[in-house]
Image (cartoon, rainbow, N blue to C red):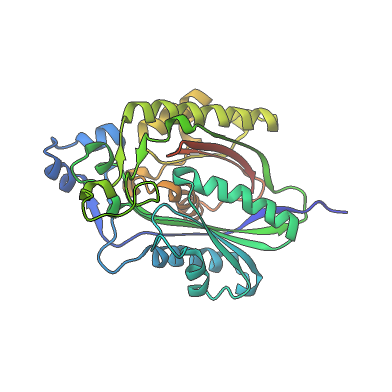
Amino acid sequence: MNTLSSRFAGFGHSVPARIVHNAEIESQLGLESGWIEKRTGIISRHWATEGETLSGLAANAGKMALDSAGIMCDEIAMVLLATSTPDHLLPPSAPLLAHRLGLKNAGAIDLAGACSGFLYALILADGFVRAQNKSVLIVAANILSRRINPAERASAVLFADGAGAVVLAPCTDGESGLEATALVSDGSSYDLITIPSGGSNKPFSPETPANEFLMSMRDGRDVFSKATGFMTRTSREVMSKAGIAASSIDHFIPHQANIRLCDAVAHSLGFEAKQIISTISHYGNSSAATIPLSLSILHQNNPIRRGQKLLMTAAGAGLSAGAALFTV
């Protein structure tokens, strides 16, 4: 009897049409020309315009992934939407996403895992595929431009809008799927990246300052240190579990937080430049969306082949982090 596993059946991505170059942000913040690229590796990013919605962006990426997979809509049994910026606090956006895509047989939920949201969704989806022998659509999407504090340099220069999607389908060849995973969290760093108000702990109030509803990064250096540590640690744990060296991994896809973080993790793990997938220069940091967006762009430009090994890792607000090794 063949062992049931999962496989990447399709990839998709979507970004708003508006491109915001560094010069616009540098002018607003009084920074010298080239400051952002030098420190983050970002040249430009996409920001949504009025009328664009998170569910709309997610639907575009999801449709591309479904078309790429070439499977019928009624074959999708679950939709997982990893986002920190849903259309509304209530209801969740995933059922609307499933409706827009015509996925009438699918359950749908939002996952709030910040930058590591896609990895957690992938691991949960893999378990569902193995248990139910049915396909899952995973979409990670964010419109972070509407949560940026334009006066806070640490976050204003980094964050972007975008969506990435994958279709995870059952497979019986025994050669594809998740080989190893590692997850970790650290609630002692809960307040490093926050949107202070709007939750049940500090609800909306007319007296609340406007910037309390915008993203804040309390200590960028501490975020960098903890994120690199968690991403490196979980990646090493995954490679150890799988008994694989960095040289045997085809593509290393880290969360695109900033280029210095990606380079630090990749260097610590021993990856060569040709193995590292980077999209941050023209897409910025769209939180959970960066890994599936990068996968889709990679597949579009240099199709991912069966048998290739992908190592993905991320860390984000909460803090939550993880890594996963996937054989295509």
Q: Position of residue 295 (x, y in %)?
A: 50, 50
- In the rendered image, is residue 271 in sight? no
Q: Quadrant of residue 142?
A: bottom left
Query: Is residue 304 or residue 257 the one in the foreground?
Result: 257
Q: In which quadrant of the rendered image does the N terminus lie? A: bottom right
Q: Position of residue 117 (x, y in %)?
A: 50, 47
- Who's the residue at 50% across and 64% down the image? 94
Q: Is residue 100 above or below residue 294?
A: below
Q: Position of residue 309 (x, y in %)?
A: 62, 41
Q: Position of residue 178 (x, y in %)?
A: 67, 45
- In the rendered image, is residue 243 in sight? yes
> For the image shown, how many numbered marks are present on the structure?
0
Q: Is residue 260 above or below residue 95?
A: above
Left/right of residue 242 with respect to residue 267 in the rendered view: right
Q: Quadrant of residue 107?
A: bottom right
- Who's the residue at 35% across and 41% down the image? 194
Query: Is residue 212 or residue 63 the one in the foreground?
Result: 212
- Who's the residue at 25% across and 32% down the image? 38
Left/right of residue 168 with respect to residue 160 in the rendered view: right
Q: Is residue 17 above or below residue 2?
A: below
